[in-house]
């Protein structure tokens, strides 16, 4: 007997199967980041009302963490690249923002609240979250979270994408490459950093500072806005032991402890972040470099240490790239 209902169900089955997996509904929840389920996010901007923002994307956890002035103010679930289209790990800068972006590669697919990380197509944007890595390399976010995030991100802001081998950690160190100078003159360093907080957090063209230290050459290079500001010699204790390949991002200053707090991430060989503070203490810049360094430091500034020669080809390690206008 002919059944119209059965016919329609049978005829539509292949079409239904071909439809994309529904996106998890974006939901603001009052949960710890570790307890978030697919599609959920939290948002606590009152925890740190001002200061520069740094994003950390964890591929193993499929989570995005938002830090402002070194304090986590939000976290969200996400979907990163699927096999064959893996999301690259590394330290990136936001190169472009477009609230109503459409893909030029995938038939004009909408990518709302887009924050571009590479000119080859990697970005943060709202998209489908099936509960596992499913993108073509981008980091997909819940729509409601992406809208809030778009309001606090700025061009030049630091985004760290990490895997299980390069998970970021924190290191507190007063001197950095300034040596004892920073301990003695911390107030001046702190004042210089605070004077740049507004620009780093809100300006259309924020400071874009990078410091590269090579133990192979015992040289430091200071870059700002894509231009070489200065370079000179550094003294490295125990010089026979190369500096590990690491990226440090300045996230916070602690006036009470008179210290600078950095997020450290390993890349390539020697990716582990153990002894990160001890390795920083091995570096001391020559006196003439100290004042330019002090004037250039700001939240979001990056320091790259490497045991290899300081050439453009060596500033990104295999499996972990440092993409920035200065590299």
Image: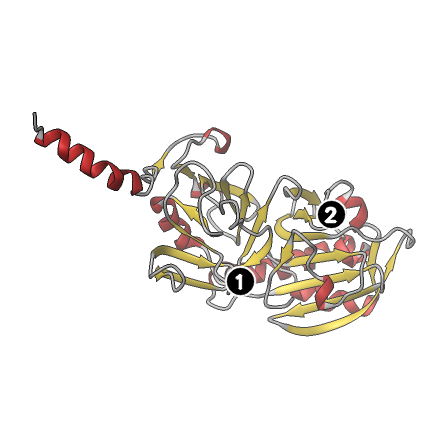
**Residue at image mark 1:** 156
Give the image's coloring scheme: secondary structure
Left or right, 106 with respect to 240, comes to left
- Residue toward you, 160 or 1: 1
Quadrant housing the N terminus = top left
Q: Secondary structure at mark 1?
A: loop
Q: Is residue 185 above or below residue 273?
A: below
Specify few, some or many for label 1: CA neighbours under 10 Å numbering under 14, 14-19, or 20 or more.
many
263 over 234 or under it: above or below:
above
Which residue is pictured at 72% across the width and 43% down the height? 273
Point 72% across, 46% down: residue: 271
Mark 2 neighbour class, 10 Å CA radius: few under 14, some 14 to 19, many 20 or more: many
- Please state if 187 lies on the left or on the right of 45 as rendered: right
- Can you name the residue that lies furthest to the front here? 1
Q: CA distance from mark 1 to mark 2?
A: 24 Å
Please tell me which of labels 1 and 2 falls first in the chain: 1
**Residue 208 image position (x, y, % from top left):** 59, 65
Residue displayed at 46% across by 67% down = 204
Viewer-proximal residue among 300 and 97: 97
Q: Residue at x 53, y 65 (%)?
A: 206
Q: Element type at marker 2?
A: loop
Q: Nearer the viewer, residue 153 or 88?
A: 88
The x, y position of residue 82, in whole percent, is 49, 45
Label number found at residue 173? 2
Query: Marks 2 and 1: in contact by CB < 8 Å?
Result: no
Give residue 101's position: percent from left, percent from top.
35, 61
Q: Dividing the image into 4 quarters, which one contains the C terminus?
A: bottom right
């Amino acid at each position: 007997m002919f059944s119209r209902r059965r016919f329609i169900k049978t005829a539509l089955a292949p079409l239904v199967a071909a439809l994309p997996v529904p996106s998890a509904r974006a939901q603001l929840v009052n949960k710890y980041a570790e307890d978030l389920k697919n599609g959920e996010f939290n948002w606590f901007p009152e925890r740190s009302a001002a200061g520069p923002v740094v994003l950390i994307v964890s591929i193993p956890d499929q989570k995005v963490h938002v830090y402002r002035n070194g304090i986590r103010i939000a976290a969200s679930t996400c979907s990163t690249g699927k096999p064959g289209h893996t999301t690259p790990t590394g330290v990136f800068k936001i190169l472009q923002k477009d609230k109503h972006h459409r893909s030029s590669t995938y038939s004009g697919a909408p990518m709302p609240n887009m924050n571009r990380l590479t000119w080859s197509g990697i970005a943060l944007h709202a998209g489908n979250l099936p509960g596992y890595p499913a993108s073509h390399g981008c980091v997909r976010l819940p729509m409601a979270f992406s809208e809030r995030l778009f309001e606090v991100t700025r061009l030049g802001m630091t985004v760290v994408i990490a895997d299980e081998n390069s998970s970021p950690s924190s290191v507190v160190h007063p001197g950095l490459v300034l040596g004892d100078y920073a301990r003695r003159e911390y107030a001046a360093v702190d004042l210089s950093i605070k004077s740049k907080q507004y620009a780093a957090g809100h300006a259309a063209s924020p400071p874009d500072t990078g410091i590269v230290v090579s133990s192979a050459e015992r040289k430091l290079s200071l870059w700002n806005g894509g231009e070489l500001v200065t370079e000179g010699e550094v003294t490295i204790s125990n010089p026979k032991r190369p500096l590990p390949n690491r990226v440090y991002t300045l996230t916070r200053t602690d006036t009470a402890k008179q210290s600078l707090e950095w997020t450290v991430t390993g890349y390539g060989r020697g990716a582990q972040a153990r002894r990160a503070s001890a390795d920083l203490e091995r570096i001391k810049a020559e006196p003439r470099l100290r004042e330019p360094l002090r004037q250039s430091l700001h939240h979001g500034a990056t320091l790259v240490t490497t045991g290899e020669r300081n050439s453009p080809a060596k500033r990104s390690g295999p499996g972990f790239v440092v993409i920035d206008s200065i590299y």
